[in-house]
Amino acid sequence: MLKTLKGRVYFLSALIVLPCYFFIYLNFDYSRIMVESELLKTARVVSNQAAENQDLLVSSTQKFLSSLSSLPQIQNPESPLCAAFVSDITPLFERYINIGVPNEQGILTCNGTQLMSPVDVLDRDYIQLALAEKRFTSSGVLVDRVTGRPTMNFAYPVQSNSDSGVILGATVAVISLDWWKTLLGSSQLPANSIAYILDANQQIAVAYPKNIQLDLPSRFNQIIKGEDGIHRAFVKNEVKDTNGSVLLTFVTGVAVDETLSAVTHRYTWIVFTFSMMVLGLLVLLRYFVLNSISKPLRLLSELSLKLGRNEPVERVQPTGVKEMDELQCSFLDMAQRKAEAEKEIIQQSQTDSLTGISNRDALNRKLSDILIDRQNHCKIGVILLDLDNFKEINDTRGHDVGDDVLKMVATRLLECASSAQLVSRYGGDEFILFFEEESVNEAQILALSDKIRSRILEPYTIQDSEVITSASIGVAMYPDDGKNLKELMVAADQAMYLAKQSGRNTVRRFSWDLKEALITKTELIRDLRNAINNKEFYLTYQPIIDRQGAVVKFEALIRWNHPQKGLIPPDKFIQFAEESGQIVAIGDWVIEEAQRALVALRKRYGDHIQIGVNVSPIQLAKQDSENGRLLSSLLMNTDDRVGKREGLVVEITEHLLMNSDESTREVLLAFREKGIQIALDDFGTGYSSLAYIMNYDIDFLKIDIKFVRKLEQDLASQTLCEAIIVMAHALGVQVIAEGVETQQQAERLIRYGCDYLQGYYFSKPVPLEQALLYQQDKVFCVR
């Protein structure tokens, strides 16, 4: 959630709002504590006030009784004068509900209220103490015998005015505890508040409200939950006499639930109001985020996606937020600049920088678009041309001249093929044209191709000199020659290479024979990859006979026994192996197999036996590469039992020497330095030159089979074979004649001085097992 802008805004809002809720809670808790404190204070005030009032009543009563006991009217408690006096003064003191003066025997006849008969009050402890100890005493809480109400009675001894040691009786004042209820009522205590006055025995003397059960807490000066489930702040205050004894105890329990409930209600309303404000703020904030941030950002995101998909980017309505509108305008301006830059880049990327015409990318895009849009409802003609021997122009005249030729070729193509949909430089010295019209047909395309060929052949005047080149042209038609762009281009390319193979400077139309040849080639290249591992290759050995008719050499010839296609001769797959680079692995395998066969053949025929192995130019070119193996190491890696003389002879073709470079020459010379003999195969099929033999120090020269076959009827072949043998011997080179099929051929070659003979006359190439059993039984004589 925090990964989104909206989530972060809400999180920030929560960080702001939650402390407010926390402070509200703290304030609420503080208010509850303050209310509880105030209620405890109220309970203390009421209780203290009751205790103070009681103490004041006691003090004033003591003074009152002290004064009263000294009056002459009280000196005789049994006299009518005393009764009349006390009866008169009692109504004058509201705090006292009764005033009486019992005599020294405790008989009460002098009383403020009328008595039906004298009352004996000597059983009252406080009266006994007053009479006996001659001091002010209190009864504590009791039920007045005269009024029948809870009261607190006080007594003071009446001493004789003439003799202070004589006790005449005691003045008694009775105080009702109703004042305490009045005090509680005037204190406006909360509802459900309670109060008790407990006597010295901690029993209820008076309760407020009336008739409630005693429910004293175990602790005071704190809020306690009562048995009735009401929380009250309980406080107690004790009233003691002069001796320190507890006369009575005031207990006040102030109810707090209603007050605290009011506080809770108030803060609940505060929290509710604040929550509504927060909710409204969040709604406004969400509206602000959506309209001022999220929507503009979403619009910008949509614009960026359109920009990424190269879709048109249109201006949208302003958001009303200045910063967002400015950002949106900047983004749209950037999108426009990007579109312009991309358009320019695309144009540059699809234009050939040298010739100014379209390039391969533009051609592929154009053709793909047409094929997709028309969906086989069109006909397309493609002309692919490649300049012949253009590399020689660059090598001999320089690349600047070559570039000028390419520019002029492009100009001539535009002039010749004004009806072409596109004229493109396909790469290097290749150009391609394609036509897309309803009237396009094969005859028109071939006629235009020949016209282009003729125009390309015309001389190019560059730097006051003429340059001449030609073009090999391939033609393919859609949908006849390919169902998609790839197949169409492959067809045109095959037709162009057919033109190259047909002598160049010509036009060739794609045919399905080419397609079949390509399929066959592809399949053979694919199958070649596993042929060694699957042990599909094997070697045959054709014996080579010396002038005395003895077997002295063998030539190792590879055969491929394909699991589906059967026996495939070397001329059908060696070229493909060279093109795919697999000839290196195959050549190494041939050498290793020939080495193993050499051991067996030398056991059979003697240590002089040698085996000739054909080496491909690709092997020579790649033997020093990072992944290559040194041929010299392979060729010399023979078993010790073979002997000191090297048993393998490298056979190379005359064409290899004709097309060799310095690296090939170094490899061949390295063979000579290591004692590896070299045979020049198919001599006479190329531009035979004595320089090859002299420069590369050739050991053996093999006359090509086509000369040997004509020896009996062609005088030129006879003369040529004899001349080759004489020439080779003059240079110290031995000669091997291939393709000997008759005794007459063998005898004539021996007569010419040929050193070795090879051919079907002696034996066909046979497997190693048959070569080990071979017996040379052909007889020939030299006349």
Image (cartoon, helix red, strand yellow):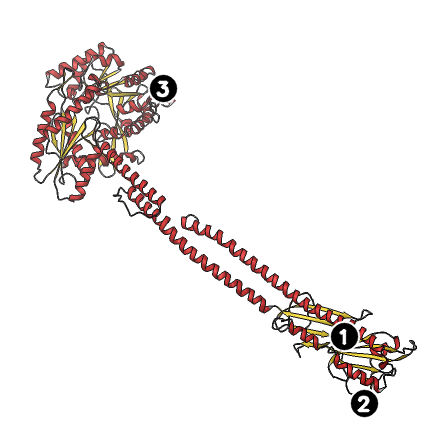
Q: Is residue 246 left or right of residue 616?
A: right
The kind of residue on which mark 3 rests is Gly
Q: Residue furthest bottom?
A: 116
Tell me where residue 738 sits by quadrant.
top left
Residues packed near mark 3 inside 10 Å, few (<14), some (14 to 19) or many (20 plus) = few
Residues packed near mark 1 inside 10 Å, few (<14), some (14 to 19) or many (20 plus) = few
Tell me where residue 26 sits by quadrant.
bottom right
Percent of width and height locating residue 589: 31, 28
Q: Nearer the viewer, residue 540 or 337?
A: 337
Q: Is residue 466 left or right of residue 648?
A: left
Check the image and report above or below for 348 versus 18: above
Which residue position is annotated with label 1?
A: 201
Percent of width and height locating residue 546: 24, 17
Which residue position is annotated with label 2?
A: 117
Q: Nearer the viewer, residue 116 or 315?
A: 116
Query: Which is closer to the viewer, label 3 or label 1?
Result: 1
- Secondary structure of the residue carrying numbered label 1: loop
The kind of residue on which mark 1 rests is Asn
Name which of mark 3 and mark 2 comes first in the sequence. 2
Percent of width and height locating residue 199: 75, 75
Percent of width and height locating residue 534: 30, 36
Q: Nearer the viewer, residue 148 or 418?
A: 148
- Secondary structure of the residue carrying numbered label 3: loop
State the quadrant of the C terminus: top left
The kind of residue on which mark 2 rests is Ser
